[in-house]
Amino acid sequence: MNFRRRQLLGWSLLGAAALAGGAWLANLDYAKKISSDVLDLIPVDERSPELSLVRQLASQAGARTMFFELTAAGGQPVPAALARDFAARLAQEPAFDQAQALSDPAPREALGRALFAHRLTLLFPRWLHDRETAFAATRGGPADFPRWLADDSAAALGKFLATPEALAFQDLVPADPLLLLPAVVERLKGSLGAGPADDRGPALVWARLAASPLSEAGQGPAFAAIARVTAGLRADFPGLRVADTGVNRFAAASRARIEHEVTWLNALSLAAVLAVAWAFIPAVHRGLHLLPVVLLAVLGAWVGTTLVFERLHILVFVIGSLLTGVAIDYGFYLFMQPPLRPDEDYWAKVRRLAKPLLASCFTTVAGFALLLFSELPLIRQLGVFVGAGLVCALAAAVVYFATVRNAFLPTRSFRGGQALPAAWRRNLRRALLLAWVLALPGLALLRWRDDIRELEIPSPAVQREDARLRALFGEGHDRTVYLTYGASLDAARASLAKLETWLHTAGGGRTETAGLGALVPTAAEHARAVRFWREQPEFGPELRAALARAGFEPGEFAAFFDAYARQARTATAADLADAVTALQAKLSGPLGLLVHRGQPFSWFVTVATRAPALAPPADTHTVSAGQLQSLNQLFSRYRRSALWLSLTGLAIVGAGVFFSYGVRDGVRIFAIPCGACLGLFGLFGWLGQPLNLFHLLGAFLGVCLTHNYSIFSATSAYRHEPPPVSVRLSALTTAASFGVLALSGIPVVRALGTTVALMVVAALLVIEFEHLAGLKGKS
């Protein structure tokens, strides 16, 4: 085939591939395909109940909450009526499914009515349990309990009526002489989310989004709705200012900054790679032949990844910017290898270089393919992205340079390590070996710290505003929020009882708690109450007599005794579920977040002040909603899993090298990437640098990349030649590409970029000082 036909065929193949890939990408719905949701980094079928609970919360009410403060132009609170108007208008917006002014008493009144209607089913069992505990301390006999309980209740009522708090319940006491409602109101003080009903204090509004705050539907439409409502109210109240916070504000800020980083990191990475390349290439315009290889590799990576995965995290493309520095390797090696003789055909040159090219590409791709077995979606996606990109880069390089008339790019002469006298090179090799040996003990000092917050770009201004507004809503550093879960509400309530016991013991009696768990008895407490009603019918008459002895007129409590007699006659175990359902129907606003019944978990929320620093025991089935411990522990587990995958991948890469070059030479070739990795991690240990999952991923990437340079250099070493310029250029462009990642505002991306850049530089130094000079066995 003559050159012209080969050129047309090559252009046709590359053009068709580019058009097909471009058409695929042009038809994608990027809003649905690409996510910035941190929880999309976690498998949907993750087997940890704690993580399933966090995922469920993130898509339900807990994370969908937004907090608002309304002020006038001078910073003073707006009238309470305006706050209620703001909430009413916001609730009518499709982006929100609830909104309430904290000064609005209606939700608390609805809860009070529901509790009153079901007070004996919901509140009596817990009250009875507490009184039985108190009676046990008296060491009285079971037969004495009804009379003791009646006398104790009458005495408690007398003491309560002598307190100022009794004024608020004076109309309620005739129907509740056991003080079931006053007791539970006292326990719920920290849970009611109440604000002043008048114009005193800040004007606060609570709202809940209709969509997940981590999705676009929970961000842009919500912010637009807030702006519309605010603008509408300013017509009557010109000085109105609205401050708000929520998870969606953090997610939107992070998404915007990550999208910005995707653009400038890729652009800067490409610019850095081309700058390094052109420093070695005298004919700058001919260096542009490398661009199609890089662009087609990136196109192939995008197409391959979007074809394989239904949904991708945006971090894949941020970290995937490293592909620019890797994909250009094959172009360098093919384009910069001089022909053996002036008349050598291009395809003869390709066949001559096929062994190092294929060994480099397919061993690296095999290592990355192993990442598909990772539990972590991001690692699987990155494995496909880089693997597909490398295959496309090799194919594009082979086909594209077949279309170039003179497929050889001369470079400027750089002697590198060979510019130094042999004795100097020998001493420098010894110095590198000594530094490596000294670094190795640092491996014992390595510290691992996995923090999911490092996956996002910090937003200090948003964090400060969030802390200020949450403080107005009563959320402080001394409060800990616990979520106690179970497969059913009964199971969750049983676990909550264990949590309450643990908090009392571990907190030394100083921990104060609030939550709607106080309104729902355990199944055992309710069953005990049903037995009490059936087995102790004398309690009603005993209480009448005790009230009379205490100076009360028993007839005033007729409503209570009628309700109590009816409850004692008709109570069954099924009453509890019906009462809880009725209660939940009345819970709205902040109160609705405190209890949930559904699948796969039901849960109770407990707010604790001066809580123990320790995590609750596993048998309490409780996680802290105010901390990220569960996700951090999960990432630690993924790191351990990724370590084994990386070691297995390296074994595959090493086996490929040994198979291609033999054990003796293979060990020497593979020692460069492995030695660079161990030495760098030892240095991190000495420096006290905490490492995470992405340092480990960077080490795996670095080993796969630097083993390419070892293989390409080995081919020259067999011919007793210095390392090819293409290896130097490839290593430096890779270091530049990853060095750009080290400038990222995302801590984990910065960690990955720094790790790989340092590994590549270390490997290049070793190659320059003739580590492979002793290879002699093959040609």
Image: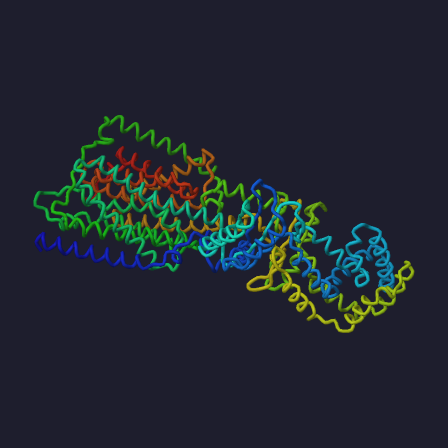
Residue placed furthest toward the bottom: 570
Q: Name the image quarter holding residue 536.
A: bottom right
Image position of 568 with respect to 378: above or below:
below
Where residue 147 appears, x then y in whole percent?
87, 62
Q: Is residue 241 visible?
A: no
The picture quadrant where one finds residue 123 is bottom right
Point out residue 372 in the picture as x, y percentages from the top left corner: 38, 56
Quick check: can you spot residue 571?
A: yes
Is 632 in front, or is 566? 566
Q: By what rule are the colours in the image chosen?
A: rainbow
Q: Quadrant of the N terminus?
A: bottom left
Total labels drawn: 0
Q: Is residue 630 above or below residue 536?
A: above
Left or right: 282 with respect to 568? left
- Relative horizontal placement of residue 573, taking residue 322 as reference (left or right): right
At horizontal 48% and vertical 60% (from top left) the residue drawn is: 45
Q: In percent of the image, x 42 and y 35: which residue is there?
A: 683
Q: Which image quadrant is residue 748 in? A: top left
Q: Residue 258: where, in percent of width, then height?
A: 40, 46
The C terminus: image quadrant? top left
Percent position of residue 532, x then y: 79, 67
Camera-side residue of 575 and 433: 575
Residue in the foreground of this view, choosing between 395 and 176: 176
